[in-house]
Image: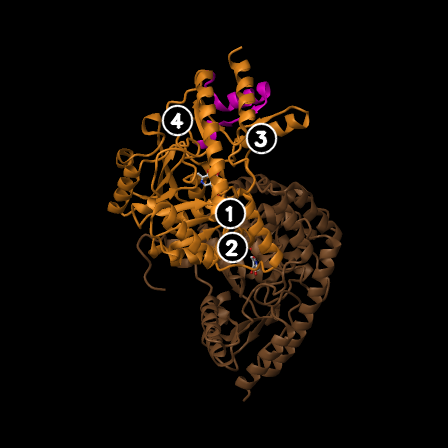
Chain colours: A orange, B brown
Amino acid sequence: MSTPHPRIAARMAGIAPFHVMDILARARQLEAQGHAIIHLEIGEPDFPTPRPIIEAGMAALNQGDLHYTPALGLPQLRSAIADFYAQHYGVQLSAQRVIVTPGASGALLLALGVLANPGDTVLLADPGYPCNRHFARFIEARTLAVPVGADTGYQLTPELVERYWAPGIKVVLLASPSNPTGTVVPDADVRAIAGICAARGATLIVDEIYHGLIYEGSYHTALAHSNQVFVVNSFSKYFQMTGWRLGWLAAPEWAIEALDRLVQNLYLAASTPAQYAALAAFMPATLAILETRKAELKVRRDYLASALRELGFDLPVLPQGAFYLYAGCGRFSQDSFAFAAQILEQTGVAITPGVDFGTHQAQRFVRFAYTTSLPDLQEAVRRLREYLQP
Amino acid sequence: MSTPHPRIAARMAGIAPFHVMDILARARQLEAQGHAIIHLEIGEPDFPTPRPIIEAGMAALNQGDLHYTPALGLPQLRSAIADFYAQHYGVQLSAQRVIVTPGASGALLLALGVLANPGDTVLLADPGYPCNRHFARFIEARTLAVPVGADTGYQLTPELVERYWAPGIKVVLLASPSNPTGTVVPDADVRAIAGICAARGATLIVDEIYHGLIYEGSYHTALAHSNQVFVVNSFSKYFQMTGWRLGWLAAPEWAIEALDRLVQNLYLAASTPAQYAALAAFMPATLAILETRKAELKVRRDYLASALRELGFDLPVLPQGAFYLYAGCGRFSQDSFAFAAQILEQTGVAITPGVDFGTHQAQRFVRFAYTTSLPDLQEAVRRLREYLQP
Ligand SMILES: Cc1ncc(COP(=O)(O)O)c(C=O)c1O
Ligand SMILES: Cc1ncc(COP(=O)(O)O)c(C=O)c1O
């Protein structure tokens, strides 16, 4: 970045762009020149929004009342989300504790906004979702990024939380499954970390945006372990509604009134068409479509994971969820951004450099998103093989 | 408010709820008991979204690609907004300077986020749109609220800006037309205030969300006066797309890169269905519908303004725009909240107390929104007359 204009606020120096945007821009250039680019850098499902959701959205538009909804969301959608927890996880959750938000993005900013004072610390894992440290920076809070590796499944553990505990930690943030690693925090660890937080007057936020996309094992929502935890989720990934901008936050009772005030002021409310459309998200017909697609994602994961290993990428743990493989590229390069750029130029395969997710070993990792069809993944692997094992 | 939970961040003490929500909740109760409530408290047009916009939205849904758009918005929508400035105002604006946002709400938070440091001061008018002081509070900035009255059309003037200038003022925020007063800042004043800001190293933000709803006189956008000003606008009010959550921000070139980073992190992007739908907002067929509705709003304003004056409300200036009348109720009460509550109980007419818009004489004003049909306004006036002039 060049020197910022003198009127730009200081916080902006701590808010980085997504480096993958440079990769994406170059990919678009190459495409414009006629090259066939395979996009493995995109953090959203390639599937279209399921038809029943689209049809519910169209019916809502056609009916025409698209005014603001209540700040906390349509009551019937809050209930539907609460019911989903009962049916899917066997967890009783009052609809009063569910807040409909503009994406998990909105839920994360709201949760941090009501919990963290300027100078307070948010404890989180490195690598992790980059926006988290920027949400914290935006509200003048600090982050303490704990380096995590394959030994802990790239996740915080109760031991790591204890070891890194410091005065001023007010929030611990987990993402399970994680972006970029796809790994899940075991139930016992979530419970133990919630306990540590409770004992020390801090609050646990768990981002479960990829929780619907866990391919094996059965994992509880953090809401099953504690009614003091903030759980972030979204219609973006499992429900494949990224562009609709809709998510939710389940919060303890004591936080709802403050969250209501904050939603009123920051957002007024979440999108009305999206909320009506999402009422169809939990219908059996929709869930059937989503489960089929999830099975397809698992096939892709299995294929790509073993192909990458065979190519020489380091993949010590097979991630249980999301649609990412966070692969060590140390055998090929010590500069993941340069490596990603080079792969793009030489093979037309676009991937995300580790530097987008933190600093810990970020130069030796790249993220592959299997958000494209199996034939495309096969073609990508063919090209990579040709380039890396000539 | 009761004592907040100890884990709630300090900023939340400075972020007030909308008091009108209490009025609204009581109105819903009365409705549930069978009372016919007339809603003059609602800050959004009663009209449905124009049909061509709905149809463009439905076509976008039906086509199915509802992934994230680029952070700054669909290129074709950014161009359409830039073209609108050329056609409507004769102002040349590069599409590169237009950012599509989640409502004017998003635009205001982004603008303040890139401009104001913690402790910096935002100068604005009291009464004014309540979220503004809360956006500032959210990012740890201060506000200096200048009491404004009928003598300056309830707006800041260059003289007031000079008089209240203080070290630490980094942003001056105008809304023209204003919510709650509907009054417009004259072109010469916008130009002069932009000049004062430029001379003192501060930045002017002008919220033009109601600019499409000016019923007489011809006013320029602030972009005509300076290329250093931030202009906020929205598809919510004139374009009648409130629930879609779509707006825009036109900013100086030096701020675009920082704004891009902030949108990427805070929002990812604005709603995809809304952006495709909004492409139809500038079509002649849509504008024809909107202009008819605007004419209807003017008829309502003229009727309600003279009726309120006749009833004994104080309305020294006839507002040129928006859909609000900010009326002095000093003849009836010195407690605008109690007055609004009482009016609701006794007449079934819901209005907004002045306390939602600041502290300056807030107890002696109430806001009437003419976002309901003329017959309903007439019925409201009949009921008020019966109660106030028995
Ligand atoms: C871990 C994680 N959390 C939150 C988000 C935000 O998603 P959205 O705002 O679309 O719900 C993302 C998106 O990529 C993510 O990967
Ligand atoms: C003056 C003003 N600015 C901004 C907004 C936010 O509108 P939106 O986010 O729907 O565009 C409003 C809404 O009432 C308003 O009155």
Residue at image location 65% in from the left, 74% down from the top? B374
| Chain to which mark 1 belongs | B
Magenta region: which residues?
A: A332-357
Asked if residue A333 is among those painted magenta in the image, a careful observer would answer: yes
| Chain to which mark 2 belongs | B
Label 4 with label 2: CB-CB less than 8 Å: no
Residue at image location 53% in from the left, 44% down from the top? A241
Q: Nearer the viewer, mark 3 or mark 2?
A: 3
Q: Please give left or right for residue B255 compared with residue B339 in the image.
A: right
Q: Nearer the viewer, mark 1 or mark 4?
A: 4
Rendered image: mark on residue B122: 2
Q: Please give left or right for residue B142 compared with residue A350 in the image.
A: left
Outermost residue to the bottom:
B390
Q: Position of residue A259 (x, y in %)?
A: 41, 55
Q: Where is residue A21 in the image (x, y as percent from the top left)?
A: 56, 32
Rendered image: mark on residue A318: 4
Q: Could you tell me how far apart the alpha carbons at marks 1 and 3 are, in whole angstroms?
A: 26 Å
Residue placed under numbered mark 3 in the picture: A24
